[in-house]
Amino acid sequence: MNIHFLFSFSFFFLLFLLSLRRFTSRIVDKLKEYKVAHRGLGEGRHTFHFVLEDSFFNCFEATKGTEGKIEAVVEIIKSSLLMEVNMKIEGSVKAICDRCLEVFDLQIKGELSLYVKQSGREVDNEDDFIILAPEDDFLDLSSYLYEIYMLNYPMRVVHEEGHCDPAMERVLDEYITDEKEKPTDPRWDDLRKLINN
């Protein structure tokens, strides 16, 4: 192989790694406010308030309805053995109605409870249990807040009944037809009667 080619490839690969590092550090910096220093917390109940806005949602791929404001309240109950983390979100985001295509404020509300424990050995996280390594000083809540949001974002986004654009509803009524049962051949009906008996 050509030494010049290897040198060029190495140089551009290092540039790529440096730019990737800068990009990921910007994302990490944006999510820094969603980390809780759990080591400094005494035993008992602690409450934290967060706001999920565009800057938060832009850190995640494939987010629906990112324009808006979601308030999150996180309550951590710390004991000597583990921490119980209760998270609640509530707010509204801009969404497009799947029926009339009009932009409206969609209300989002949800909650999630987790348990956090420190362990020196490597253990897979269970569904509602997070295992932290002893050297972890912070509990990163950003992915869990995002999870609550996405789990409570409806699959079908529509206005409340009677709030859709009336012009679009008329168009939909005109072109959507209910499928009525087609008349069947009486010979098949007789055959079905024989099978069902």
Image (tube, rainbow, N blue to C red):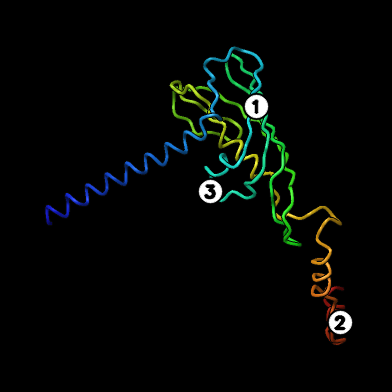
User: What kind of element bears circle 1?
Assistant: strand
Question: Which residue has dot 3 on it?
Answer: 61
First of labels 3, 1 by sequence position:
1
Q: Residue 99 versus residue 86: which sits nearer the camera? A: 99
Question: Which residue has dot 1 on it?
Answer: 49
Residue lying at 55% horizontally and 24% vertically, measured from the top left: 36
Taking the image as shown, residue 77 lies to the left or right of residue 182, namely left
Query: Is residue 188 positioned above or below 34 on the image?
Result: below
| Residue 57 place in picture, x, y as percent | 58, 43
Taking the image as shown, residue 19 lies to the left or right of residue 81, namely left
The mark lying in front, picked from 1 and 2, is 1
Q: Residue 17 versus residue 115: which sits nearer the camera? A: 17
Task: Give the residue type at disc 1.
Answer: His
Query: Is residue 137 positioned above or below 175 on the image?
Result: above
Question: Which residue has dot 2 on it?
Answer: 189
Residue lying at 32% horizontally and 43% vertically, measured from the top left: 17
The mark lying in front, picked from 3 and 2, is 3
User: What kind of element bears circle 3?
Assistant: loop
CA distance for labels 3 and 2: 54 Å
